[in-house]
Image (cartoon, rainbow, N blue to C red):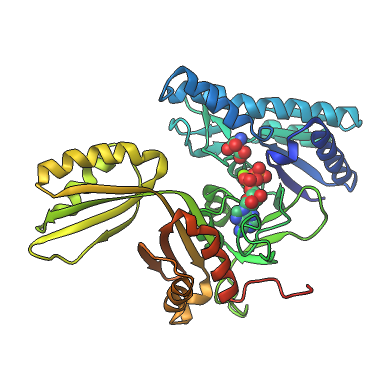
Amino acid sequence: MALYVHKYGGTSVGTVERIKYVADKINQARKQGDDIVVVVSAMSGETDRLLGLAREMQRQPNPRELDVLLSTGEQVTIALLCMALEAEGCPASSYTGAQARILTDAAHTKARILDIDTSRVRRDLEQGKVVVVAGFQGVNEEGDITTLGRGGSDTTAVALAAALKADECRIYTDVDGVYTTDPRVEPKARRLDRITFEEMLEMASLGSKVLQIRAVEFAGKYNVPLRVLSTFDDGPGTLITYEEEEMEQALISGIAFNRDEAKLTVEGVPDHPGIAASILGPIADANIEVDMIVQNVAENDTTDFTFTVHRNDYARALEILQGVCRDLGANQVTGDDHIVKVSMVGVGMRSHAGIASKMFRALAEEGINIRMISTSEIKVSVVLDEKYLELAVRTLHETFGLDTPPGA
Ligand code: ADP
Ligand code: ASP
Ligand code: MG
């Protein structure tokens, strides 16, 4: 008998009808003789709605209280799903993160899972029940409710699958697998049968929200077989795998993009040792994460220093830099929060030169100006004006032969 962890995202449990549909799907799987642990998200839009309510109370709500609030979304769906299962004659029990003993650190709103005590879950499974666990939440040592960051239900599912040594962790969602790029932006995107952990991790960290980054990290670390598939259509989905020597590696596996970017430049900084530290130090002290960094070659003993941050942190970063600019005797601070990052990812890039230049040429031919560039062994990222996002993604998708062949 196999043990599967199923995870259903917000759209999959977005209405009463859908919850009933998911219950039916789980019941069918159980009738095949498998043990099933289910992780669910809040109903679609619910987490955003709760966040909106919080912001009406306080500009920057207390993270501990925010977690108490946000975790209620998932508590609703676990109860409703269990009722729907029971109505079908399928015995089921719901568990909040705390009840399922998902122990996390104390970093409210972005907590990490430290340990899961699976004894209660196992006992229920032995009694033939379906176990339904609230995604996205846990409990810290103090007994306070924590949440795992947006998209965190994926991580709950993978962590449970690791702790239970499940045969597979199945992430059911509103697309039938991982595509060469977000199919909402490029309808010609192709579903991938397989993608390596390394590539999936890169895609997730560069903005593909189909899986939370931590879920992929966790699956890679604990060897959890992970598959993304559709809640509503049958099909094999996409398997996340290890790189196999004999596997012919595609040059480019996918194109990821991130709309949540903003960039800041300190112009005319005196060029002497310690400059990067004195600019980025205060940014780090304010807990603002920095992504790309570029320092220009000095001219007349001054230089320009540019970096990108999450759009939500733009205003704060700008304010901090005004102070830094005065202290350093730099000329001025400029910024732009209408930029995006588009990245091409592929392990096949390792053994091929010229990918970046082909990418830059394709963008140039469309008149798209590149503002920043960053590369690693398996990715090339460019920062562009927001208005070019769709055009850039589609152009690159075609240039690198990722489009669905006509008639397929
Ligand atoms: P869920 O609510 O089920 O967790 P998400 O909205 O978090 O679903 O993730 C699924 C969405 O991810 C898809 O609807 C799709 O728009 C988006 N997405 C982004 N990049 C990709 C990709 N490369 N392949 C498939 N889906 C992608
Ligand atoms: N409900 C949470 C969110 O919207 C967690 C999740 O869906 O994975 O981010
Ligand atoms: Mg998600």
Percent x, y of residue 299: 12, 66
What residue appears at the point 62 percent right and 78 percent down from the top-left corner?
247
Quadrant in the picture for residue 238: bottom right
Position of the C terminus, as image quadrant, is bottom right
Asked if residue 167 is positioned above or below residue 75 in the image, the reply reads below
At x 63%, y 36%, the residue is: 135
Classify 368 as above or below 284: below
Q: Residue furthest top?
A: 57
Query: What residue do we see at 58% from left, 42% from top?
Result: 151
Identify which residue, 400 or 108, lies in the foreground: 400
Mark yes or no: residue 113 visible. yes
- Image coords of residue 364 (percent x, y): 43, 73
Q: Is residue 238 left or right of residue 102?
A: right
Question: x, y percentage for residue 50?
Answer: 57, 25
Q: Where ligand 2 lies, by quadrant?
A: top right
Residue 123 at x, y percent in the picture? 74, 32
**How many numbered discs?**
0
- Locate residue 323 relative to residue 383 in the image: left or right: left
- Residue at 22% x, 47% y is 333
Which quadrant would residue 252 be assigned to in this image?
A: bottom right
Seen as rendered, the residue at the extreme front is: 367
Residue 99 seen in the current view: no
In the image, 369 versus 256, the foreground residue is 369
